[in-house]
Image: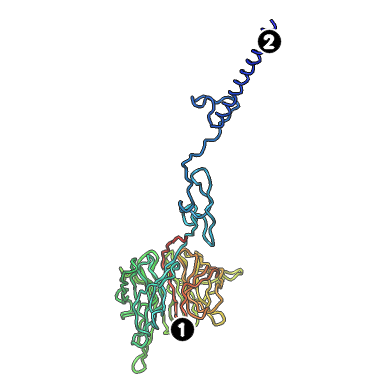
């Protein structure tokens, strides 16, 4: 009996060890399944056992992260395609991330302005050139002048930019007045420029004599032209008669000159001259300078076409009465929006640029005013301001650095930069093209 009892005890001990070993084996298997990512029930679409959480899906062994260079990115953060993030750097200077128009690419979309100007860069003779504010390469020459006595002035684009009006004068050729030229501007930089002389018979006959148009100003929304008409008449009779040069300010429709021709202002005296003939962009009126001296600036006037009235452009004087003080100035330029005027006045013997805010005052005492007059240049002599189409900048010529160059600046006189830099060469008389364009800088 003792033997049997002893053996039963040994058998029970062995059985307990076997059960314990079996339980340990099952626990190890579960842990092994968790480590390999296999959870009970998932393979059959069943929920996992309570308390057991599935780990994140592993990254595929064959995923190769992309790079900033591969994606053409150079700023900000992008995905590497494998769940990570790439930092592609920062932009420098005026460039911004995405400023190029493409995400995560440094750049800047810049507005550029075409302009025509007069220069002596081809020898000692003047010619008309075209350039743009974003391109510092050699400008395109539009005329082929070779006479050192020939001068160009009063550049003005037609509203669509297809033609450029230019005054040409040559000393010593028995021509008492400038010739008005129209330059056809081709879109192709390699295309030839056609140059036509504007003759009096193309603009109508209103004196009974031939005349010479000058200072062409093109209507913004039509084909009419305002200009100064030069002509000669005999003053007096017999041996005491003198040949005098006179000038009228005229509005003409070249397509129908016989009915649309209107004389705005008649110059009775030999010294009266009309300059800076400029259409208001909204139409219906023409701004100009009327002077009686070749040196001092004249009065700025406005001709109201519908009412056939000419009034002073003035500034209001504070007080109980609506007093208007006439504004004197020359070389007028109006913004495309028609709300601002730039002009030239002498300050301490130097030509400086001023701006003011245009306003119309309807009613019985209809008048044109320009308030908030402000001087925006102070260095050297400054000439012939011309607004960019968006009104963001003025182009002008100046001798502030010793040579006459073309400059660009904000309407408040800030951010001045030279567009031309040619030692000893005259660059002047800029006229901005009415259409701008954009380029992307990276």
First in residue order: circle 2 vs circle 1: 2
Q: Residues within 10 Å of mark 2 (few under 14, many from 20)?
A: few
Residue that protrudes farthest toward the front in the picture = 3
Direction top: furthest residue: 1
Q: Secondary structure at mark 2?
A: helix
Q: Is residue 331 left or right of residue 204?
A: right
Toward the viewer: 68 or 254?
A: 68
107 or 356: nearer the viewer: 107
Residue 63 horizontal/vertical position (percent) = 47, 42
Q: To which quarter of the image does residue 258 belong?
A: bottom left
Indicate left or right for 170 with 405 as reference: left
Q: Nearer the viewer, residue 347 or 131?
A: 131
Pointer 2 residue: 6
Residue 198 lies, with reference to residue 107, above or below; the image says below
Residue under circle 1?
Answer: 294
Is disc 1 surrounded by few (<14), some (14 to 19) or many (20+) residues within 10 Å? few
**Alpha carbon separation for disc pair 2 and 1:** 142 Å
Percent position of residue 379, x then y: 55, 77
Query: For residue 171, which quarter of the picture?
Result: bottom left
Quadrant of the image containing the N terminus: top right
Residue at x-position 49% and y-position 58%: 107
In the image, residue 1 sits, relative to residue 100, either above or below, namely above
Q: x and y percent of residue 202 in the render?
A: 30, 74
């Amino acid at each position: 009996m003792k033997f049997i009892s002893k053996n039963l005890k040994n058998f029970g001990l062995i059985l307990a060890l076997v059960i314990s070993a079996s339980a340990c084996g099952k626990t190890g298997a579960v842990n092994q399944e968790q480590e390999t990512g296999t959870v009970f029930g998932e393979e059959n679409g069943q929920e996992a056992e309570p308390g057991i959480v599935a780990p994140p899906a592993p990254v595929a062994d064959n995923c190769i992260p992309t790079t900033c260079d591969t994606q053409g990115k150079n700023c900000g953060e992008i995905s590497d395609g494998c769940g990570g993030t790439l930092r592609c750097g920062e932009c420098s200077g005026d460039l911004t991330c995405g400023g190029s128009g493409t995400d995560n690419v440094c750049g800047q979309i810049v507005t550029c302005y075409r302009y025509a100007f007069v220069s002596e860069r081809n020898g000692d003779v003047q010619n008309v050139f075209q350039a743009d504010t974003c391109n510092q390469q050699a400008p395109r020459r539009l005329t082929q002048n070779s006479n050192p006595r020939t001068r160009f002035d009063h550049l003005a684009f037609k509203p669509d930019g297809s033609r450029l009006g230019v005054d040409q004068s040559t000393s010593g050729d028995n021509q008492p007045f400038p010739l008005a030229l129209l330059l056809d501007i081709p879109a192709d930089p390699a295309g030839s420029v056609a140059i036509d002389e504007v003759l009096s018979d193309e603009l109508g006959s209103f004196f009974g004599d031939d005349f010479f148009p000058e200072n062409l100003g093109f209507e913004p929304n039509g084909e009419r032209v305002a200009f100064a008409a030069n002509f000669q008449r005999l003053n007096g009779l017999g041996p005491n008669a003198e040949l005098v040069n006179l000038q009228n300010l005229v509005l003409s429709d070249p397509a129908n000159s016989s009915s649309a021709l209107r004389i705005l202002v008649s110059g009775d005296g030999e010294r009266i001259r009309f300059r800076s003939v400029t259409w208001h962009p909204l139409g219906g009126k023409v701004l100009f300078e009327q002077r009686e001296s070749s040196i001092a600036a004249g009065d700025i006037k406005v001709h109201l076409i519908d009412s056939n009235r000419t009034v002073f452009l003035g500034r209001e004087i504070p007080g109980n009465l609506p007093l208007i003080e006439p504004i004197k100035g020359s070389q007028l330029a109006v913004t495309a929006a028609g709300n601002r005027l730039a002009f030239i006045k002498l300050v301490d013997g130097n030509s400086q640029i001023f701006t003011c805010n245009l306003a119309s005052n309807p009613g019985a005492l209809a008048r044109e005013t320009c308030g908030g007059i402000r001087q925006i240049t102070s260095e050297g002599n400054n000439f012939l301001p011309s607004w960019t189409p968006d009104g963001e900048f003025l182009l002008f010529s100046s001798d502030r650095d010793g040579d006459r160059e073309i400059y660009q600046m904000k309407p408040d006189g800030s951010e001045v930069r030279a567009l031309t830099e040619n030692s000893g060469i005259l660059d002047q008389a800029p006229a901005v093209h009415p259409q701008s364009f954009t380029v992307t800088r990276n």
